[in-house]
Image (tube, helix red, strand yellow):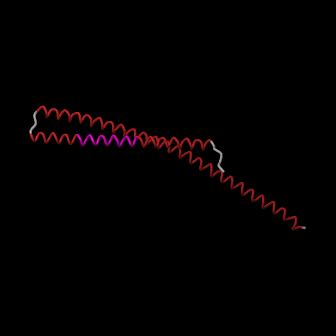
Amino acid sequence: MTTPSTPLDTLIGLARDARDQAGQALAGERQSERQVAGQLESLGRYRLEYAQRLQQAMREGIDPATMRNYQRFLDSLDDALARARQALAAQQQRVGQSQAQWQQQQRRLSSYDTLAERRAAQQNRKAQRQELRTSDDLVNSRLLRSRPSSES
């Protein structure tokens, strides 16, 4: 037997859906953060390798034009690294906002669940009192019926 849906049950369902959506959004933001961090790491490794190539070329002797080309490319890699760091910081901020949103939705759901638990406990107490009252009435009615027969 299912209990009829109440407005609180509806709110709980909506809050659960909102929490789940916030969780999916958070997972997506975290995935994006990992991708951006991976790109930054790859770019950093590439810049290090390229700088090592420049050092090797300088040890072996390099003409000024080639050295300028190396240096310009390293400068462009430095710019790309700076942009990647900014992108990572922005993505980390989005992760933080998304996590705060998920936590807010979780707190809302927990509040509704607490209300539902209180309502269920109240209904149980009411049912127990009713059952006790019914039991007492039944015992009293049996006692009343048994008294006249014992007096006769």
Estimate the x, y position of residue 148 in percent, counting from the top left: 87, 64
Q: What's drawn in magenta, residue-wise?
A: 29-46
In this picture, residue 82 sits left or right of residue 131: left
Estimate the x, y position of residue 94 in percent, counting from the top left: 40, 38
Estimate the x, y position of residue 120 in percent, counting from the top left: 62, 50
Q: Is residue 132 magenta?
A: no
Q: Nearer the viewer, residue 48 or 107?
A: 48
Q: How many marks?
A: 0
For the point 12% across and 40% down, which residue is it?
57
For the point 19% across and 40% down, which residue is it?
50
Quarter of the picture holding the C terminus: bottom right
Q: Nearer the viewer, residue 146 or 68?
A: 68
For the point 46% across and 40% down, which residue is it?
101
Q: Is residue 38 magenta?
A: yes
In the figure, residue 97 lies in which quadrant?
top left
In the figure, residue 130 lies in which quadrant?
bottom right
Q: Main secondary structure of the magenta part?
A: helix
In this picture, residue 70 sits left or right of residue 9: left
In this picture, residue 58 sits left or right of residue 83: left
